[in-house]
Image (tube, rainbow, N blue to C red):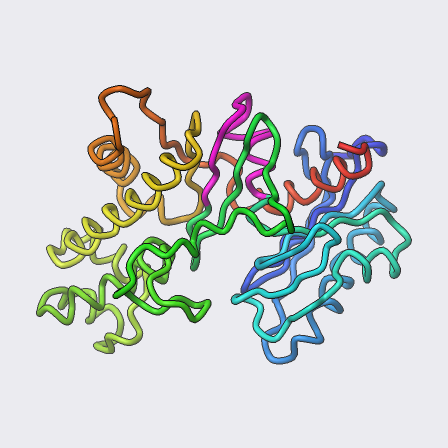
Amino acid sequence: MTVEPRNRFIGIDVGGTKILGVVADAATGEIEARHKVATPKEDPNQLPIAINDVVAALIEETGRPVGIGVGVPGLVDHQGVLHYGPNVPGVLGLDIAGELRMAFGLPTIAENDATCAALAEHRLGAAMGTSHAIIINQGTGIAGGIIIGGRMHRGANGFAGEPGHMLINASGHTCACGKVGCWESVASGAGLANLAREVVAEGNGDRIVELAGNEPAHIRGEHVAAAMAEGDPGAEEVTKRFVQWVAAGLVNLIALLDPEIIVLGGGLTAINRHFLSEVQLRVNETMMGAAYRPVVPIVPARLGAEAGAIGAAISSRDMFLGR
């Protein structure tokens, strides 16, 4: 397909393992082209080079876009500078937007990757038509976006939307950010593995350990999911605890922000076919004043793995239109 030129924007989603770029119609989400490379791990100075290469490849394939948007994990300010990102170690104070603007002479914006994904889900996905929404992405960590009054809430510095780093258990696990007790240390992919090690240390979860090569330190979320698919009791206990911790964080967010809807994205929503309904039930049971307030529906994201890149394109279009 060919995208309407006035709506052609490049969206880049920088992940922990890959950088995905798309040329998209930022009004409809239709994608004209894609390009993907591995995220550089060894040398942080290679990250901006890799991003530039993705943009250059897309321009060569489809022509110049109206603008560029980039989503990157971490603390990205309103000027598009990445100050810190636990999943892109060593990359500090990187002016992503400025470097791309200089390299390609195009309007460019950079912000948090989960903010971009949330923007896409609000404009085109599961939260479309709502004025107050929370969009959470559960991957290796947890990030999210907050819609207030129909607009993305980015905060004073651009750093809003990091619910994974709410401190929820002071005697809990160490998070990737170095703090102890973050929500993502018990409610993300890494958190699922942490909970599995808890169960194994209590003398259960033999099948999980077996799937991890008999090395508890090597347990990952996928091992829990595989054991769960086999009906393993240890995996069922892990999943029960996981549901409780996911719900605990959502209850806190609901109490603080009073959303119409919560959208959960990321592969963890498919850990078992009852996951979302079990989280919904737990939230309904533990929410303050539950009997006197509307139920907040918890629904799956619709746009999948390309939401971040599409949202980055939308963000660029918003900037171009002065929204």
Residue 87 x, y percent position in the rendering: 53, 66
Q: Is residue 21 left or right of residue 73?
A: right
The answer to whether residue 135 is magenta is: yes
Residue 213 percent coordinates (x, y)? 25, 75
Percent position of residue 321, x then y:
81, 32
In the picture as drawn, the residue positioned furthest to the front comes out as 156
Which image quarter: residue 295? Answer: top left
Q: Is residue 175 above or below residue 41?
A: above
Q: Please provide percent x and percent y for residue 180.
A: 35, 67
On the rendered structure, is 290 left or right of 95? left
Q: Does residue 150 appear to the left or right of 181 in the view shown?
A: right
Q: Residue 97 or 249: which is nearer the viewer? A: 249
Picture quadrant of residue 42: bottom right
Q: Residue at x 53, y 42 (%)?
A: 145
Kindly identify the residue that appears in the image at 44 percent across and 34 percent down.
257
Q: Quadrant of the N terminus?
A: top right
User: Looking at the image, how many numbered discs can be counted on the residues?
Assistant: 0
Q: Nearer the viewer, residue 260 or 47?
A: 260
| Boundaries of the magenta span | 117-136
Q: Is residue 167 above or below residue 27?
A: below
Task: Identify the image quadrant of the C terminus.
Answer: top right
Position of 39 relative to 104 (above/below): below
Give the left or right position of residue 191, taking residue 209 as reference. Answer: right
Residue ranking furthest to the right: 105
Q: Is residue 151 magenta?
A: no
The structure residue drawn at horizontal position 36% and vertical position 49%, both measured from the top left corner, is 268
